[in-house]
Image (cartoon, rainbow, N blue to C red):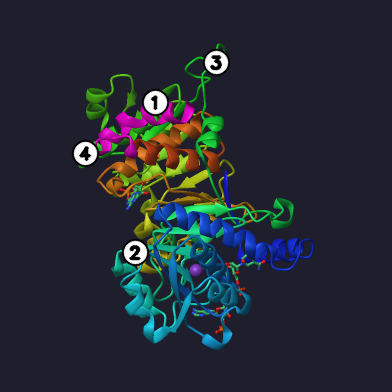
């Protein structure tokens, strides 16, 4: 598992650790890790040209000490001081002693244009708001220079706790972060500014860090959660998933949701609705009925919503599924048709899977607001509906109705997933995992993980059906 901790937790753990180690030791650990990452990126340190963007806090200190280490290995470097009177004193002294030159913000863009490596030490976890006006042209010059840009702890200008970006921010190729990941490194739009992530252990005690704000499943976590048939299994014990999706107008959604469901680990898939002929043509193994979920027979979980349209029939399908005392996943049209009270009064788990537009409609806000504040939106939806919410996007978030539990983030997806019907495959897949017995939050986060990984293992440009066909490869990849 990869964990993200809040700034408050990091400060607490750092404070406790600082009391036990000699002064300056943590910054030296951070600087050593940062210098090593810089050297790896450069390939050859000797002769490389460095620029260090230095703000007024310890983030600039880390950058200066790291640069001093690289200068001692034969690099040359210039520090651009954004607040010359407040730059980290010892760091600056070490940098000068190693032969570093110093300039003010005005001289920055000129040196950046010839740099091989830019270290962004403007702000770390102490930063507030976007970059200030004097820093913005430097961030732009770094981005345009062709130099490798390495953010120190965080890309300056992003919100460490939320992943929000309020104004201009550094756009890094890589971020070297200290002690633990910060939520902003894992959630878009900030995550997209961070580039490749590297964590440097500075000795923080996990017990002092406490419960993370965020967690991201890794291969081993997913492998441990995947349902696997045993000698005792039969198709019913493995779980039956019901799919109420598609309509006469959109039969394809029924096929896609069933494709995902068949690849999700349940023992059988029941389809209920008007798309049965299309489903059977593609998936003869499906148990098809034409009525609503109520009359479809027993299932261990329902998926309702993709391509339902907004007819009376569609509304009945949603009401029926929500009335069933089994886990229910609601997606797409189902999200528009649901009655909030019907979700809130359920006792079995509910999973809502909106994209940003659907989340905005459920919250009564603008889509842009949800996209800019994804963590806040997913938490608020989970609390309002008493449901597990999977918010789709370039990084997918899964929040539990219990606010004490860390939000899960998934980053396996790739932009090729933005193709019609890929969400339908995700609903079927996640519903199948629910039917197989996974807890709602596990089903949603494992579903998102496999879905993204399947896209990575597909030929591109991919179609939604390619994605369903690649799910066994994702499954195998995780299990190996
Ligand atoms: N603690 C530790 O043990 C360790 C900490 N470590 C490192 O320290 C970092 C935290 O250091 P920090 O607390 O000094 O804050 P930091 O992120 O450098 O920035 C705050 C300064 O920036 C300013 N400022 C604020 N917003 C701004 C903006 N938008 N644009 C421009 N300036 C802005 C604000 O000053 P202001 O002008 O607002 O008075 C303030 O002075 C952490 O991320 C890690 O890298 C490591 O060495 C490991 C050990
Ligand atoms: N830029 C992106 N990077 C990674 N994944 C993405 C991106 N855009 C969309 N996705 C993923 O693609 C899927 C699209 O689902 P959805 O919006 O419901 O589409 P549809 O309704 O066409 O099926 C979601 O799983 C989402 O997380
Ligand atoms: K930084």
Q: Are marks 3 and 2 in contact (CB under 8 Å)?
A: no
Q: Find residue 125 and name its label.
A: none
Disc 2 from disc 4: Cα separation = 55 Å
Q: Earlier in the sequence, mark 2 or mark 4?
A: 2
Few, some or many C-alpha atoms within 10 Å of disc 3 (few <14, some 14-19, many ≥20)?
Answer: few
Disc 1 from disc 4: Cα separation = 20 Å
Ligand 1 placement by image quarter: bottom right
Q: Position of residue 258 (x, y in %)?
A: 33, 31
**Which of the image's four quarters has the N terminus?**
top right
Write down the residue under mark 2. 147
Residue closer to the observer: 46 or 465 = 46
Write down the residue under mark 3. 230
Local SS, label 1: strand
Q: Earlier in the sequence, mark 3 or mark 2?
A: 2
Between disc 3 and disc 2, the foreground one is: 2
Magenta segment, which residues? 455-480
Q: Position of residue 346 (x, y in %)?
A: 56, 46
Disc 3 from disc 2: Cα separation = 54 Å
Write down the residue under mark 1. 269
């Amino acid at each position: 598992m990869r964990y993200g901790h809040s700034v408050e937790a990091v400060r607490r753990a750092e404070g406790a650790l600082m009391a036990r180690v000699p002064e300056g030791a943590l910054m030296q650990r951070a600087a050593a890790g940062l210098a090593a990452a810089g050297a790896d990126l450069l390939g050859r340190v000797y002769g490389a040209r460095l620029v260090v963007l230095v703000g007024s806090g310890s983030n600039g200190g880390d950058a200066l000490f790291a640069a001093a280490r690289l200068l001692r290995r034969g690099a040359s470097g210039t520090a651009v001081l954004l607040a010359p009177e407040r730059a980290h004193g010892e760091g600056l002294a070490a940098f000068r002693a190693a032969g570093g030159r110093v300039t003010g913000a005005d001289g920055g863009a000129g040196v950046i244009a010839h740099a091989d490596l830019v270290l962004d030490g403007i702000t770390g976890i102490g930063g507030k708001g976007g970059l200030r006006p004097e820093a913005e042209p430097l961030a732009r010059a770094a981005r345009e220079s062709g130099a490798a840009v390495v953010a120190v702890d965080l890309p300056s200008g992003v919100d460490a706790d939320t992943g929000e970006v309020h104004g201009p921010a550094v756009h890094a190729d890589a971020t070297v972060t200290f002690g633990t990941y910060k939520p902003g490194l894992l959630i878009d739009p900030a995550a997209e500014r961070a580039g490749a992530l590297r964590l440097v252990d500075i000795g923080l005690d996990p017990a002092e860090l406490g419960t993370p704000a965020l967690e991201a499943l890794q291969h081993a976590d997913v492998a441990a959660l995947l349902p696997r048939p045993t000698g005792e299994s039969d198709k019913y014990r493995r779980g039956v998933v019901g799919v109420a999706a598609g309509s006469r107008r959109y039969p394809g959604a029924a096929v896609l949701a069933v494709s995902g469901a068949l690849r999700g680990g349940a023992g059988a898939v029941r389809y209920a609705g008007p798309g049965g002929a299309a489903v059977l043509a593609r998936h003869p193994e499906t148990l098809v009925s034409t009525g609503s979920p109520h009359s479809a027979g027993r299932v261990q979980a329902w998926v309702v919503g993709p391509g339902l349209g907004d007819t009376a029939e569609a509304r009945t399908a949603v009401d029926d599924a929500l009335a069933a005392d089994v886990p229910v996943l609601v997606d797409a049209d189902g999200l528009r048709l649901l009655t909030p009270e019907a979700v809130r009064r359920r006792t079995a788990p509910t999973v809502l899977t909106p994209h940003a537009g659907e989340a905005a409609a459920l919250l009564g806000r603008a889509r842009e607001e949800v996209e800019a504040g994804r963590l806040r939106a997913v938490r608020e939806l989970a609390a309002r509906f008493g449901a597990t919410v999977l918010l789709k996007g370039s990084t997918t978030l899964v929040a539990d109705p219990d606010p004490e539990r860390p939000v899960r983030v998934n980053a396996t997806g790739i932009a090729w997933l933005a193709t019609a019907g890929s969400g339908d495959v995700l609903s079927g897949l996640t519903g199948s995992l629910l039917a197989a017995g996974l807890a709602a939050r596990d089903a949603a986060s494992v579903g998102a993980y496999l879905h993204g990984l399947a896209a990575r293992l597909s030929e591109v440009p991919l179609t939604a059906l390619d994605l369903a066909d690649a799910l066994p490869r994702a499954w195998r990849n995780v299990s190996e």
